[in-house]
Structure formats: C-alpha cells, structure tokens
Amino acid sequence: MSFIEKIRSTIVISSILGATLASAAVAQSRSPQGIAAKFQAADVNHDGKLTLEEAKAGMPRVAEAFDTIDVEKKGYLTLEQIQAFAAKR
C-alpha cells in the first residue's frame, strides 16, 4: 500500500468513526435520560417547568416546537410532555 493510499484509508476510517460518534451523541440526547439531563440544566429556577425563555436558552429544539408541545396552553412544559413528544418522533 502506498503512502497516499494509507492516508486515504486513514481519512475514510476517521470519517466513519466521526459519523458513528455523532450518531451516538444524537441518539443519547434523544433518550429519556438525555432529555432529562437537558431539561434539568435548562430549568434554571428548578420548578419542574420549562418556560419558552428557558427552552430558548437551554433546549432550542424544544423552543421551536413549544406551542405544539404545550397543548394545554399553560405557558410551560414539563419533562413528561417533552419526553412524550420526543417519543412520537
């Protein structure tokens, strides 16, 4: 194997590994535990409710779907609502 072929091989392997790690990170962030960890970090006043402002700062994807998730129009989301919404996707 030539030097150029070795470099190409290394680049391909690195690309595959990077894509695999990125996929694993996305899967983890969508898991109930990953969502719970993000929720706890975003819920800055620790009241168990995520306002639109908290969502914008800590869970931007949730903020984008806030009105869809907040079906009762209470102005906040609970962890359970977010997890149920994520499970449907």
Image (cartoon, rainbow, N blue to C red):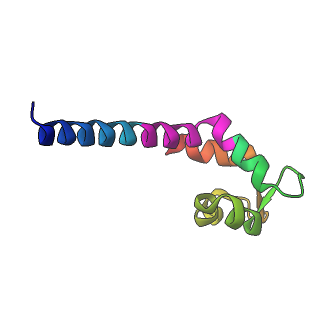
In this rendering, is residue 31 above or below 86? above
Residue 24 lies, in percent from the top left, at 47, 36
Q: Residue at x 88, y 52 (%)?
A: 46
Q: Is residue 44 left or right of residue 61?
A: right
- The quarter of the picture where residue 55 lies is bottom right
Please say whether residue 76 is visible from this viewpoint. yes
- The quarter of the picture where residue 49 lies is bottom right
Residue 38 lies, in percent from the top left, at 70, 48
Identify the image quadrant of the N terminus: top left
Q: Is residue 18 left or right of residue 47?
A: left
Magenta residue span: 21-35
Residue 26 lies, in percent from the top left, at 50, 43
Nearer-the-camera pick, 70 or 64? 64
Q: Residue at x 63, y 42 (%)?
A: 84
Q: Is residue 12 left or right of residue 78?
A: left
Q: Residue at x 62, y 58 (%)?
A: 62
- The quarter of the picture where residue 42 lies is bottom right
Q: Is residue 34 magenta?
A: yes
Q: Is residue 82 magenta?
A: no
Nearer-the-camera pick, 50 or 69? 50
Q: Residue at x 73, y 67 (%)?
A: 52
State whether the magenta stretch is mostly helix, strand or loop.
helix
Most extreme residue toward the top, as rendered?
Answer: 1
